Image: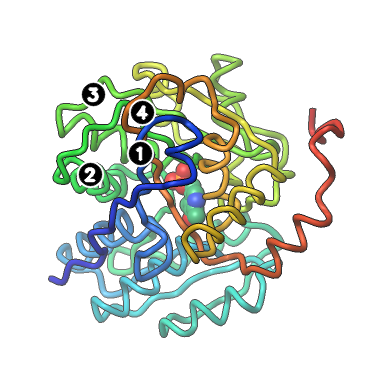
Amino acid sequence: MPILHKNTPLVLSKTYSERLSAKVWFKMDANQPSGSFKLRGIGHVCKTYKKEGSKGLICASGGNAGLAVAYAGRKLGLPVTIVVPKTTSQRAIDAIEKEKASVCVNGESYQEAHEYALTLTSDTHRYVHSFDDPLLWEGHATLVDEIHATGIVPDLIVLSVGGGGLLCGVLEGVARNGWGTIPILAVETHGAHSLASALEAKEHLALKNITSIATSLGAKKVAQQAFEQSQKHEVIPHVVSDREAVEACLQFAKDHQIIVEPACGAALAALAKAHPGTHQKKHIVVIVCGGVGTDINQLLYWQHHLPPDSMPLANE
Ligand SMILES: *Cc1c(COP(=O)(O)O)cnc(C)c1O
């Protein structure tokens, strides 16, 4: 079966290396064919399902997970149905349809779309979860295998957290490469900070609602595994504002000519602020997780319309 994800480059960031007096490396998963790291885990899940006899794939997502399943299904020759809630943009629907998947609009929210999608599944038409599945984490872990193969040994890994699938995958990757002691700076935007608030409360709780513009981070509750593993490993939770995430996306666009979502900008924003976890490090690797849900006009709009950071944050 074809390998669906690409081995992505590890690029030195001149801007942040100078600012932090460390070598700051960007793991460029924005370069994946589906535009985000999601293809790693999702590609692995879809291939496994096909081997196990699946004749079709179902997923609820108006975002990068839906796009990754659509891409994987097309490459594997499996029909794909993506259920999206009514709030999904036409742009996102068009992108999924370009991958030849059928889009089914159902439900007022992601939760309702998810519940409807589950009714479409069967032994031969399996559901692909966007963050909470051990098979998915096993696929995401290839990210760390590739970093390991470059010979660069990070003393800090920086990444974004939504439902925590990427985090679980990176934790599996560092463990299987003998790198289990590398600390991980786990960044969320305020209003999507489900990991930070659960860790602070020492309880696997859910946010009441999502108020961040970084919709790809908008899981009210992280995966149980993400919550548990974060307490066993040195995972440093960190929360940035939407504005900081957007500014970091614009800086990244300037430096690398690539547009990423604020969900990805969150991890970059932790560098802009020189989080204490970045002090005295030699090699910092930042996972540039990507995302295709945003364009340059949207980033500029947010830059002009989001409140300044001195204003009190909502949802507090
Ligand atoms: C899915 C996604 C995330 C969050 O990943 P989780 O595995 O849910 O934590 C972050 N950024 C982008 C661009 C995503 O698509």
Q: CA distance from mark 4 to mark 1?
A: 6 Å
Q: Is residue 309 left or right of 223 when viewed as pictured? A: right
From this view, report whether residue 47 is shown above or below residue 147. Answer: below
Looking at the rendered image, the disc whose residue lies closer to the viewer, 2 or 3, is 2
Mark 2 element type = helix
Give the mark nearest the N terminus, 4 or 3: 4
Q: CA distance from mark 2 to mark 4?
A: 12 Å
Q: In the rendering, at what x and y percent does residue 7 appear?
A: 23, 59
Q: Which residue is mark 1?
A: 285
Looking at the rendered image, the disc whose residue lies closer to the viewer, 3 or 1, is 1
Give the mark nearest the N terminus, 4 or 1: 4
Q: Crowding at label 2, few (<14), some or many (≥20) Cα neighbours within 10 Å?
A: many
Give the mark nearest the N terminus, 3 or 1: 3
Q: Which residue is mark 4?
A: 156
Is mark 4 in CB contact (under 8 Å) with mark 1?
Answer: yes
Label disc, if present, on residue 147 of the rendered structure? 2
Give the mark nearest the N terminus, 2 or 4: 2
Q: Quadrant of residue 35?
A: bottom left
| The C terminus: image quadrant | top right
| The N terminus: image quadrant | bottom left
Q: Which residue is mark 3?
A: 180
From this view, report whether residue 74 is shown above or below residue 286. Answer: below
The residue at the point 84 percent across, 32 percent down is: 310
The residue at the point 50 percent across, 57 percent down is: 255
Is mark 1 in CB contact (under 8 Å) with mark 2?
Answer: yes
Q: In the rendering, at what x and y percent does residue 184 appear?
A: 39, 28
The residue at the point 60 percent across, 32 percent down is: 273
Q: Crowding at label 1, few (<14), some or many (≥20) Cα neighbours within 10 Å?
A: many
- The CB of the residue at mark 4 lies under 8 Å from ligand 1: no
Question: Looking at numbered disc 4 in the image, what kind of residue is underneath it?
Answer: Leu
Q: CA distance from mark 4 to mark 3?
A: 11 Å
